Image (spheres, coloured by chain):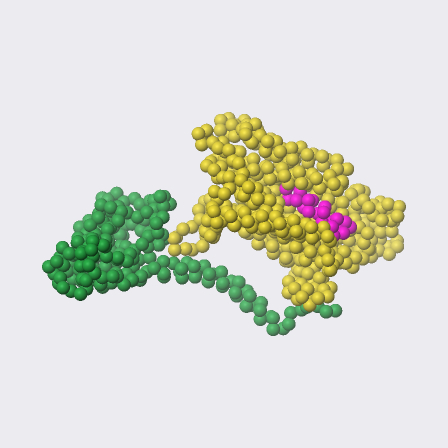
Chain colours: A green, B yellow
């Protein structure tokens, strides 16, 4: 009788198949969860900007307040990228001949904006309001990191939905007094006690929603 | 009970005067009615079943049916493709009727799937020997029906590429399905059901696949059947393990017969919509599922036994038994329908009362009428044995039940949604051509898979059928020499 039975070498297939069946789904889940997460794909995004503007120099060494340039941050949803005129407030007088300023001066002369490349970009279906956060104790550093130490700005946090939710569900540690809002060196977790965080939470009436329509309106 | 020698009373009681057994639906006290007709040898069973797979050419009817099924399947493909490209707006859904044909079809197909597990698991545990003739293709039907059912939740989410959100998979959004929602339980219930049914079906098929492998002439067939028969050689140890595994799987899938459709009914029952918010739903859905499932088995068995010459294995007695199950479950469903009305009145809840009066006499009165006539009234004809054993009538009635059960889900879902608490939000649902095409196309998917199964896999559990023949009983008719037959207790 001719019957197809498995050759001896195929005995090896059984443990292989069982191992593959057990590990591949686990691997796939971890691959999607970590490999494709913004933590892996987005953090560290550091495009070369048209003008070699140094936040480390301006915000760090010179100590300019964030709000000098990003004027609308306390009042509007967007933090606003400064107009060329803001640069020229100082640079009309300071190092006016620096070759690094060529594009700024060109923009100033033509009236066309400098094509800055946006780094922190939320999807269009996610509603985010800067003023709601900045005016109620969430400092710049919480989301943007130590901009005052960045020669060229990069994305420091994943800005993923999970990352947003972590703070919305447990906001205490990220609260600071309004006087320290733009102080990137102020470490709210280390410098404030739990009761001080609690006091801030009460003071600002922080009770963040985490339902879908909070951000997806 | 006493099994008498084949050459005495048994042969006479179920046979005509030519010695050919024609009617095994008669119950005679002290006798087991034969479940396999006109066959004395096991090899006849093998030959009859394998002939379907081994024939050079399938019956012409198979080609006709397969062409039709493929045609409908392509309709499904077009409808789903159009849906994916355009969005769920191509269906006739509106606010408030956000579920209509999609979920109707889902519940319909999941329900169909229930007969397979009932036959394979519960009837097995209750030692109902007649199950062996029909369990294989009833299980196949279950699996294909669950595939059809699974299509609908997948496509009704709108953005099908996010269908994986149905499963609790870790993700960077930290977004999890709502574990308190029955819709998630449903995902687990149906996928468990599919997995267990598939395992059960496949485990039971291994010895028969080995038979096909051993008989196969072509290299390809030998390899194919050989691969899937997992090196089965029919040794004593193989059989022992097989029987253990089969029993365990039967025990595992028995609770599923009750749980899966209960969970499906929770999709509705745990909501607060009048017409859905009903505690009777779980048993009512399970009865309905078995009702529709058995009707579908009859719908498939009647042409299949005709087309492939299996009348001696799927006998009138099998069909008669199934029709009895249809009658019983049909009565249960009818009881549930009337109890819903009683509770609506007894509750004194205005909205509940309205929902049911509106269901029967409102704008969907015609759907309700179809449902009651097909599910409660016409199955009563099965009280008559003549109708239970008439092939054309049972075929027609089984289709009527299928239609009725589709309408039951339509009535529950659409009539409840269309007229909820707020008259200002009421709206009527009208299906579009995509709705209708998808509904019909699912039948194409189902029949394509089923016809492929008939052609390439053993349609009847040969090994098990042989075991219920009197010849398999070492003390019974087959082995008994003249005057040597003895009383043997099967219980």
Number of numbered tags placed on the structure image = 0
Q: Residue B23 is drawn in which quadrant?
A: top right
Which is more toward the observer, A73 or B146? Answer: A73
Furthest toward the left, the residue is A93
Q: Is residue B135 visible?
A: no
In the image, residue B196 lies in the stretch drawn in magenta: no
Q: Which residues are magenta?
A: B291-314
Q: Position of residue B443 (x, y in %)?
A: 61, 46
> In the shown orientation, is residue B310 left or right of residue B178?
right
Q: Nearer the viewer, residue B474 or A214?
A: A214
Q: Residue A52: x percent and y percent? A: 22, 63
Q: Is residue B434 above or below residue B244?
A: above
Q: Position of residue B48 (x, y in %)?
A: 76, 56
Left or right, B7 with respect to A46, comes to: right
Q: Is residue B486 above or below residue B240?
A: above
x 31%, y 51%: residue = A167
Residue B98 visible (yes or no): yes
Horizontal side, residue B65 vs residue A166: left or right: right
Q: Most prominent secondary structure in the magenta stretch? A: helix
From this view, report whether residue B126 is shown above or below residue B238.
above
Q: Nearer the viewer, residue A73 or A160?
A: A73
Q: Residue at x 43, y 61 (%)?
A: A31
- Of all residues, the one furthest to the front in this rendering is A110
Quarter of the image containing the C terminus of chain A?
Answer: top left
Q: Quadrant of the N terminus of chain A?
A: bottom right
Q: Residue at x 82, y 55 (%)?
A: B40
């Amino acid at each position: 009788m001719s019957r197809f039975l498995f050759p001896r070498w195929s005995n090896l297939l059984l443990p292989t198949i069982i191992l593959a069946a057990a590990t591949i789904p686990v691997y796939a889940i971890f691959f999607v969860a970590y490999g494709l997460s913004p933590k892996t794909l987005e953090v560290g995004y550091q495009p070369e900007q048209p003008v070699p503007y140094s936040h480390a120099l301006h915000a760090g060494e010179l100590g300019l307040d964030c709000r000098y340039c990003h004027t609308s941050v306390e009042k509007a949803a967007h933090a606003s990228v400064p107009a060329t005129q803001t640069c020229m407030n100082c640079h009309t007088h300071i190092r006016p001949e620096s070759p690094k300023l060529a594009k700024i001066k060109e923009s100033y002369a033509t009236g066309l904006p400098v094509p800055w490349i946006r780094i922190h970009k939320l999807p269009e279906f996610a509603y985010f309001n800067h003023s709601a956060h900045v005016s109620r104790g969430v400092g710049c550093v919480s989301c943007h990191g130590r901009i005052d130490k960045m020669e060229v700005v990069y994305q420091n946090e994943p800005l993923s939905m999970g990352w947003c939710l972590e703070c919305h569900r447990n906001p205490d540690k990220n609260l600071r007094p309004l006087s320290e809002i733009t102080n990137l060196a102020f470490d709210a977790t280390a410098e404030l006690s739990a009761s001080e965080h609690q006091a801030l939470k009460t003071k600002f009436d922080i009770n963040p929603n985490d339902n879908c329509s909070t951000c997806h309106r | 009970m006493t099994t008498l020698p084949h050459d005495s009373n048994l042969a006479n009681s179920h046979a005509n005067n030519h010695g050919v057994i024609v009617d095994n639906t008669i119950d005679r006290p002290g006798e087991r009615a034969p479940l396999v007709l006109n066959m004395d040898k096991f090899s006849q069973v093998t030959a009859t079943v394998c002939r379907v797979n081994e024939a050079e050419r399938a019956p012409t009817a198979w080609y006709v049916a397969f062409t039709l099924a493929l045609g409908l399947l392509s309709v499904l493909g077009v409808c789903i493709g159009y849906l994916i490209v355009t969005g769920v707006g191509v269906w006739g859904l509106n606010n408030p009727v956000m579920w209509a044909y999609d979920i109707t079809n889902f519940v319909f197909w999941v329900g169909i799937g229930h007969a397979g597990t009932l036959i394979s698991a519960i009837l097995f545990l209750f030692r109902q020997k007649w199950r062996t003739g029909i369990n294989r293709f009833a299980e196949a039907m279950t699996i294909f029906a669950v595939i059809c059912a699974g299509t609908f939740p997948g496509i009704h989410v709108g953005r099908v590429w996010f269908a994986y959100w149905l499963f609790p998979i870790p993700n960077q959004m930290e977004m999890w399905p709502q574990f308190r929602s029955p819709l998630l339980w449903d995902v687990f219930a149906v996928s468990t059901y599919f997995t267990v049914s598939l395992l059960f079906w496949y485990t039971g098929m291994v010895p028969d696949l080995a038979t096909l492998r051993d008989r196969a002439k072509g290299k390809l067939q030998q390899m194919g059947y050989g691969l899937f028969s997992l090196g089965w050689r029919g040794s004593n140890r193989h059989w022992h393990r097989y029987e253990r595994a089969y029993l365990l799987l039967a025990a595992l899938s028995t609770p599923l017969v009750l749980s899966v459709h209960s969970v499906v009914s929770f999709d509705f029952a745990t909501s607060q919509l009048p017409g859905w918010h009903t505690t009777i739903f779980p048993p009512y859905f399970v009865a309905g599922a078995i009702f529709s499932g058995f009707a579908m088995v009859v719908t498939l068995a009647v042409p299949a036994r005709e087309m492939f010459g299996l009348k001696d294995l799927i006998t009138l007695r099998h069909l008669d038994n199934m029709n009895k199950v249809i009658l019983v479950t049909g009565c249960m469903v009818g009881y549930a329908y009337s109890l819903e009305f009683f509770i609506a009145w007894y509750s004194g809840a205005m909205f509940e009362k309205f929902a049911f009066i509106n269901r029967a006499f409102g704008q969907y009165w015609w759907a309700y009428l179809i449902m009651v006539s097909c599910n409660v009234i016409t199955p009563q004809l099965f009280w008559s044995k003549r109708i239970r054993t008439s092939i054309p009538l049972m075929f027609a009635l089984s289709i009527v039940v299928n239609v009725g059960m589709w309408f039951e889900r339509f009535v529950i879902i659409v009539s409840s949604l269309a007229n909820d608490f707020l008259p200002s939000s009421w709206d009527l649902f009208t299906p579009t051509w995509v709705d209708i095409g998808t509904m019909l196309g699912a039948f194409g998917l189902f029949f394509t898979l089923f016809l492929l199964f008939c052609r390439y896999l053993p349609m009847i559990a040969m090994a098990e059928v042989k075991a219920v023949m009197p010849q398999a009983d070492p003390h019974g008719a087959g082995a008994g020499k003249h005057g040597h037959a003895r009383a043997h207790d099967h219980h």
